[in-house]
Image: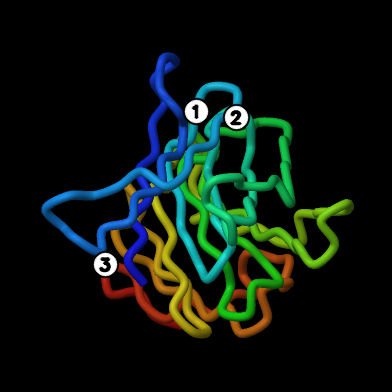
Amino acid sequence: DNMVIVNTSRGDAPQVVMYDVSDPRAPVAVGTWSGAAGGVHDSQRRGNMLYCAALGDGFYILDVSNPASPRVEVHKPYAGAFCHNIWPSKNGTHVFTTDENSGGHLRVWNVTNPNDVVQVAEWFPGSSGSIIHNVVVVGDYAYLAHYTYGLVVLDVTNPEIAARDAYDVVFDVFGNRR
């Protein structure tokens, strides 16, 4: 695959620009999208789907099978949103988001029905005022970069486990294990 995605929050530019980099010396813009209030801070592409973190506007999932005409499949605004980062589960039925603000934490959303996206779980590190940065999901594990806790690895085999203590904390930077 030779597509590279660039995101921006600048008001005078498209929020998402898709480039064909088949010739890395001459990238060609093949599509753009704008529509999020405040821009797109981060995105992750899997196949024809582009998962976009839109800060105070929640998140979007775009179908980019035709990059010249991206189509919004999901827009999920939510109370207290500062959606800094988004990552799909291995099968695409859920997305994991991080709100990079005081008390920000990991949220898990079921996205199987684009018309009824619901938050099904969340994970807090346990102290108020802590701030999460990013999440990356590889297989059954969520790797969380956290300002206070460093690296935390969660077993998310079942992403709908609702209680924070129900997640298996495999590792954190301070060597705490369960």
In the rendered image, which residue does mark 2 sit on? 36
The image position of residue 70, as x and y in percent, is: 61, 47
Residue 174 falls left or right of residue 63: left
Give how far apart the Cα atoms at labels 3 and 2 are.
Answer: 37 Å
Q: Amino acid at mark 2?
A: Ala
Q: Who is closer to the viewer here, 130 or 43? A: 43
Dividing the picture into quadrants, the one containing residue 164 is: bottom right
Contact flag, marks 2 and 1 (Cβ < 8 Å): yes
Residue 149 falls left or right of residue 66: left
Q: At x 56% / y 79%, what residue is drawn? A: 90
Looking at the rendered structure, the number of numbered marks drawn on it comes to: 3
The image position of residue 38, as x and y in percent, is: 52, 22
Q: At x 49% / y 28%, what residue is drawn? A: 39
In the rendered image, which residue does mark 1 sit on? 39
- The mark closer to the camera, 3 or 2, is 2
In the rendered image, which residue does mark 3 sit on? 174
Residue 161 falls left or right of residue 103: right
Q: Residues within 10 Å of mark 3 (few under 14, many from 20)?
A: few
Of the numbered discs 3 and 1, the one sitting upstream in the chain is 1
